[in-house]
Structures are given as C-alpha cells and as structure tokens.
Amino acid sequence: MSIHYNQVGYAPHLPKKAIITGKGENCMILSERGMDPSARKAMEEGKIAQPILSEPYFDEASGDTVRVADFSALTLPGKYYLFADSQSAIIEIKERPYRALSNALVKGLYYQRCGVELPETYAGPYGHPPCHLGKATLVKDDGELDPSTVIECAGGWHDAGDYGRYIAPAAVTVSHMLYAYELFPGAFKDELNIPESGNGVPDLLNEVRFELEWMLKMQRADGGLYHKVATRFFTGFIMPQDDQADLWLFRVTHTATGAHAACAAQASRVFRPFDAAFADRLLESAKKAWAWLEANPDFVPFTNPPNLNSGAYGDNNVEDELFWASAELYSVTGEGAYLEALKKRAPTVDISQLGWRETAGFGALCCLFVLKDKLDKDFLDSLRSRFIEGADGFLGLAQKSGYGTALDPGNYIWGSSLPILNNGIALICAHLLTGDLKYRDGALSQLDYILGLNATGYSFVTGFGAKPFMFPHHRPSYADGVDDPVPGLVSGGPNNRSPDGATKNAVPPGTPPAKFYLDFTPSASGNEIAIYWNSPAIFVAAYFDSL
C-alpha cells in the first residue's frame, strides 16, 4: 500500500496529512459515496479542498521516497476516499476522534490487572480468574532464596507481555497518567466499565490506584522498595491463572525506591481532593522512601542474580530519580531540604527524558507546571530554556523524517514507540509553555505514527485502525482462545538494534530500521506490549482529545 495515514481519524481543526510512497499520480480526495451525503454534496459543489502534494523526499529511516499529501484545508466532518497511484484509502474527519482511543488505552491497563478476577462484566471475552496470589520469597544476589523474607504482594499490573511486575516501569506509567490527568482533566470524564466506575473518582485515577496499592506493598519497613516480583523464568504462553510457578522477590534498589518516592508524592497531590487518607498514606510512603535514599547514599545498580530470567530493568544512575523525587516532594511539602536537593541536581540531569531509565523529564514537568509559582525566576527560566532546547531537538528529528517521526534513524530500539511518544509529550509541553503551534503539530505527527502513518502501515494499537497489529507478544492475547487480541494495547514497534531470533529469521537483512517489524507473536523484540508504552500514548491522545 502506497498510502500511509492516520487510520483512526483527523480532527477538523488540526493539521491533516498522509504519506504517499508511490509517484503520487492523480492524488485527490473524493467523498465516500453513500455514507456521507453532506460531504458528497460539498464535493459536487467544489468545496472539498484537494491535497497539496509535496516534492519527493528520501526518508533515511524507511528507505522510502515519500511525498506528503497535506489536506489540512479539508475541515468538513465525513468519510472520504484518498486516491493516489491507482490506490485508495478511506480517511475520516470527525469531532474528537481520539476520545475512544484515549479511553481504550486506559482500559487496556485494566486487562493487565494481576491478583484479581477479571469478570466478563468488565472484561468481556478477555476475562480470567485471579492469578499470582502466592507470597513472594526474597532471592539473594547469589541466586539463593532467603526464607526469612516472604511478603504478600498480589495486585498491580502485569508489566508487559510477561507476568512480571516491576517498580521502575510502574512508577513512570503512573506518572505519565497522572500528568495527563493534571494537565488535561477534561479528557477523563467517561466511565470505562471497570469495577470502580461510578465511585466519584475518574476511572483513570481508579486504574492508577490499583497499581499504587501494589507498589505500597513492595515497600520495606525501612522505606526501601523491592525492585520487582517475578517467577524464576519467563513462563510459556499460558493464561495468567495457569502460571503456578513460585514468586521471587528481588532486593531493594535505589532506582526503584527513587521512582516510587517521586510517583507516590505526585499521586498524593492528585488524590488529595478525592481521598485525603489515601493521599496521606502515599505521602508518608514517599517520605520514607526518600529517607532510605538519604540513609543509603552508595548507589548499587541492579542486575539479575545468576540463573534467573525476568526483566532486569537495570539502571546505572539514580540522580535523575532523585531530581524527580525531590521536585514532587517539594511540591507537596514545601520543605527546604527537597528544594535544595532539587536545585543541586537540576543542572546535571537530562530533563527532556521521560522513560523508565531516564526519568528527569518528570521532575521538569513538576517544576514547569506545578511549581512554576514557587521557584525563583532565574532557576525556572534556565530550566524552561533547557526543556525547550530539548523539544527543539525532537522537532528537528520530526522535520527531517519523511514520516514526521521524532526519532533518529539509528534509535529504532526495543520499544521504539516509547521514545517516539515521549518525544511527543515533550513537544506538547513545549507548545503549552510557548504557545508555538510548530510544537503542537510536531506532537500530532507522533500520534499519527502509532495510528498508521508510519513505514509499516500498521496501527500500533490493538483494535484501532484499518490495519491494526493482530499478534502481540502478549501471553493472554495468545492463550485466551479469542481471535482478536486484547484491545487498547500499544506495540513496541520496529527494532533493528536488538532483534530476537524469530524476527531476524523472518525480516530480511538490510531492512531499513523503520520497517524492521514483524506482526508475529514470537517477536518479543518488536511486537511486545508494555504498560509504559500505553501510558505516554494516553498522555498524547488525551491532549489532542482536549483541544
């Protein structure tokens, strides 16, 4: 197919583009006969604006020569045929095209719930009995069990396509979602048919609380956070209730503790209007985590013990988590010690990053949007300038890309959807800070990307688009006996940096990085799902839904 487009839809008042990889011959838009009389009438009256086709441009990441078909002048809601090179695609212009998407991305996390039944009432055909209810036993660094430490830790979300649960990615998932709520609360008014719906709390926050309750269980009495809970090895492609292997608890780490301190403090701020007692629990937990970090300043990075195989989430630096945590704690306490820690680390961390390993961007969001009236002008101006500089770099990547993708061609890594969407968040925040529409438009291209305007032609969200990916590396989607995968989950996307064996065997050598993708369940390196790929998509979709 030579037409690449946003398969979910375009908002009337926002830019609209498709990418043509053929010659662009006879590129035109026609109303879809029989489905939209008003659009057809406008077409007949000559009121349908035709695409403006750009000059050809070679896109390094995909190896494609592309032409941009810009039809932003077309604002009348309706369904249309976009023609080019004797091919056609149905595009749709409609009000609030991203509301259902945003809701589904949040509901996607409900399907990842661990430790509880997912009844048919809420989960439809994707339900299952409770899973992973056993207690977890601590494993020492040498791989031997420590039977003196056994905790109850049911709950939380399965992290990805496997059934492990990990604190560092949990924290950034929570923070993406909480900042989406803090900045765009109007996008989260719909009830999502989860057990807590109708309790007076937005369902996004209900879903976040489910994860937070588990995170609180993972805190040791002295404030440190256990790094993760998982089985000894990744289980086979079975349903979660059938995974009966022993649960192993992994030691307290600085990065898990720092990330928890940050997101728990932020959550205390957000939940206070709804449940003051829960907010107090969260703040106390955040303070205890910070106290552990201060009492244990010698950083020790995490690595998996020998002969164990679950997600490591290793990180060689805790300074970014400390910056983030000090910002969030200062925002809710006003205590000078947190401000001092914040200012100490601000100059040395990369405040444009919002991933599970590099988290300082969350601290920057706290400073720029929550603490903007509580920080001195020179400090805030410097931080703002650095943040905009980072966003300018992402915008430059998007403008250089034939598909508008804010990613360097050499960085199609495992979970490439994450940096693309996180760069979209940075661009959105740059627009909020400056009012400059170039940042908004750059961010929109990242949403277009996951919805089909990419070199593969797939929508990277299950259940959305004319060509959604269908075979995620996701155990329940494989084992549940349902043809369609669990809906509302985001694929990791193309990855030529570290492909697994199944992908290397199926994708020809030399395939360009933006096309190094396989919609195939065994393709963990390119088609796994993860909670922290859903969460930046929630932020980006919610922003564009709120406009």
Image (cartoon, grey):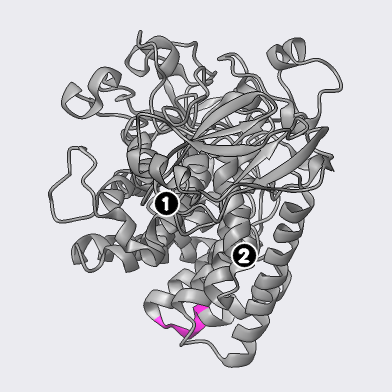
Q: Nearer the viewer, residue 514 or 252?
A: 514
Q: Dot 2, how many residues are within 10 Å of its Cα: few (below 14), some (14-19), or many (20+)?
A: many
Circle 1 SS class: loop
Circle 2 SS class: helix
Q: In the displayed image of the protein, which residue is found farthest to the front? A: 45
Asked if the residues shown at circle 1 and circle 2 are in contact, with their CB atoms under 8 angstroms apart, the answer is no
Instruction: Kindly identify the amino acid type of the residue bearing the numbered disc 1.
Output: Leu
Instruction: Kindly identify the amino acid type of the residue bearing the numbered disc 2.
Output: Tyr
SS majority, magenta: helix
Q: Position of residue 35 (x, y in %)?
A: 35, 32
Kindly identify which numbered label has been placed on residue 439: 2
- 388 left or right, relative to 472: right
Q: In the displayed image of the protein, which residue is found farthest to the bottom? A: 377
The residue depicted at 49 percent of the width and 61 percent of the height is: 292
- 511 left or right, relative to 285: right
The residue depicted at 49 percent of the width and 85 percent of the height is: 336
Q: Which residues are magenta?
A: 334-338
Kindly identify which numbered label has been placed on residue 76: 1
Q: Nearer the viewer, mark 1 or mark 2?
A: 1
